[in-house]
Amino acid sequence: MARASLDRPLHRSCPKVEMGGALLGLFAGTTTVFLKRSLVQASRGVSSMATGGEEWKNATSIYDFTAKDIDGNEVSLEKYRDHVCLIVNEPWPEPEIKKWVTDKFAVKFDMFSKVNVNGKDAHPLWKYLKSKQGGTLIDAIKWNFSKFLINKEGLPVKRYGPNVKPLEIEKDFEPYW
């Protein structure tokens, strides 16, 4: 069942997308679409955002960031404007992620490079996401497969723990289409 949902677009208005860096997963559409890990830099103040500066605090949406895809190409998250997305983290090295999701699910969505999601070296996108949707006890990403639902305006509207399966989140996409 999961394979079928990953083999086709989740929703006719949403592209298949993947992000992660410990970002493995950007879900676009109403169901599970894994993104991959991403090395994200802010489109404004790229060098200081990428090196741990505080410019991420000025971001107004995920569209203010860029990410390196799994092959090392810089991609603006502006590409996902007007799409409902789910950003998810994942732990493996890029080649393993790419092989796993391609072989197991035959996915063709965008995948991104691995980044730190916690601590002083956390990628600016992850700092932004955690500041907008804090955790239960602490804001840190506690485990792989933490997820952030992003509305069409590029704003994080809900956070999910690793134990919440993507198909369980499908109902939460509806208000944001």
Image (cartoon, rainbow, N blue to C red):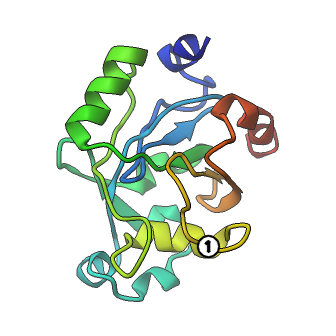
* Depicted 26 relative to depicted 168: above or below: below
* Residue 106 appears in the rendering: no
Which residue type does callout 1 highlight?
Asp
Residue position marked by numbered label 1 in the rendering: 139
The residue nearer to you, when weighing 130 against 175, is 130
For the N terminus, give its image quadrant.
top right
Residue at the (68%, 67%) spot, across then down = 135
Total number of numbered labels?
Answer: 1
The residue nearer to you, when weighing 75 against 94, is 94
**In this rendering, would 130 be left or right of 177?**
left
Residue 123: image quadrant is bottom left
| Residue 82: % across, % down | 59, 47
Residue at the (38%, 72%) spot, across then down = 122
Residue 155: image quadrant is bottom right
* Depicted 71 relative to depicted 149: above or below: above
Residue at the (33%, 21%) spot, across then down = 102
